[in-house]
Amino acid sequence: MTPAKSTEFKNPRAKYNFQGRTCSIAGVGSYVPAKILTNSDLEKMVETSDEWITTRTGIKERRIAAPDEFTSDMAAAAAQRAMANAGVTADQLDLIIVATITPDMPFPSTACLVQRKIGARKAAAFDLEAACSGFIYALEIAQQFIMSRTYDTVLVVGAEKLSSITDWKDRNTCVLFGDGAGAAVLRSRQNSHGLLTAVMGADGEKADLLFMPGGGSRCPATPESVNARMHYLRMEGKETFKNAVQAMQTAAEEALRRCEIDIARIKCIIPHQANRRIIDAVAERIGANQSQLFVNLHKYGNTSAASVAIALDEAVASGRVERGDLILLLVFGAGLTWGAAVIEW
Ligand code: ACO
């Protein structure tokens, strides 16, 4: 495959005169736990059916972490694979950003635990919380550090153990989520494009659509809060659905406008893997073909911040994208938050 010619799209960052410095994704990797929870397993836990879950969401199964397997373990495993694919060793990392809503504990950050597990002693480390949109937010922050010449090599991880905050008695939500991690190593690169643009958005007015009431400073854990099931996520499914479609459409259009390219020029669209119907509705609105979409939600369900990271790794590993292709990442999540990123692979 011939790399995309730079004349075929615009690099929106060129106007900032970074003296030819850009940022590329040097390698990606992912990890999912071994245990598979199928729709028929869920039929035994709540009043649901494989037929309902499949037709309403497209999900067939999801992965569930072992009781002694934590977000930092999955993040570290994905990170090791991304570093191997990038040809980067732990002591070359300048910064680690972990996007997650299910940290091992409120503090220290999961990024610090990952730093210890992979032995990246020179790296600074912090967590980022933007729910399902976290991976694009983290990519953009990593890119900013690289473009500003603060750092050369940044590890970005999206990792979740959503099974730990899922109410396994609530059929409205428990069929949707799964566990896993995806990672990318970003490096400075001269005179090339890499991560072309990232759109990020938020609307705190809609914070109540998707949230976890307990466990923070507003509602610390008490016997009452546990009995009231406040340490599980809650979601208004229908409203979230509508907002997801609208926000991802707007973000996609803005990202394509900035790069002055048509959707047809995108080789692979990797949307947040929450619901097949959301993906199809967004694709129709932005004029994308089914053949451009990368979908793996039938295997993993919604893994929040890990979702597009795992999908990107699988798209690359399966040969769906090759060096020079353009990729469009689309995300949406609690906050509300959303984002889109155009990457020249
Ligand atoms: N099995 C069987 N029936 C169910 C189930 C289930 N698992 N869940 C809900 N139902 C029932 C409901 O009770 C309702 O019954 P009723 O009509 O008697 O009241 C009926 O099915 C229809 O429910 P709806 O809410 O209308 O179903 P909808 O088509 O909206 O699908 C869904 C629900 C799948 C949750 C959808 O709204 C959705 O995907 N929403 C978006 C979720 C999302 O994308 N979240 C992303 C962010 S996640 C993050 O940031 C962590």
Image (spheres, helix red, strand yellow):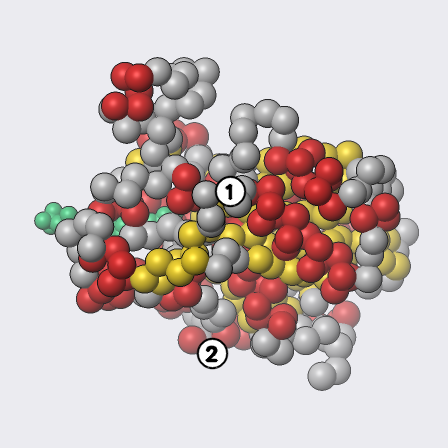
**Residue at left 25%, top 55%?**
42
* Residue 207 position by quadrant: top left
**Residue at left 55%, top 42%?**
71
Q: Give the number of the disc on residue 68.
A: 1
Kindly state the secondary structure of the residue where label 1 is placed: loop
Judging by the rendered image, the residue that carries numbered circle 2 is 291
* Residue 326 position by quadrant: bottom right
Q: Is residue 277 left or right of residue 344?
A: left
One can see residue 33 in this view: yes
- The residue under label 1 is which amino acid type? Asp
> For the N terminus, which image quadrant?
bottom right
**In front of the other: 154 or 41:** 41
One can see residue 133 in this view: no
- The residue under label 2 is which amino acid type? Ser
**Residue at left 32%, top 62%?**
38
> For the C terminus, which image quadrant?
bottom right
**Residue at left 54%, top 63%?**
311
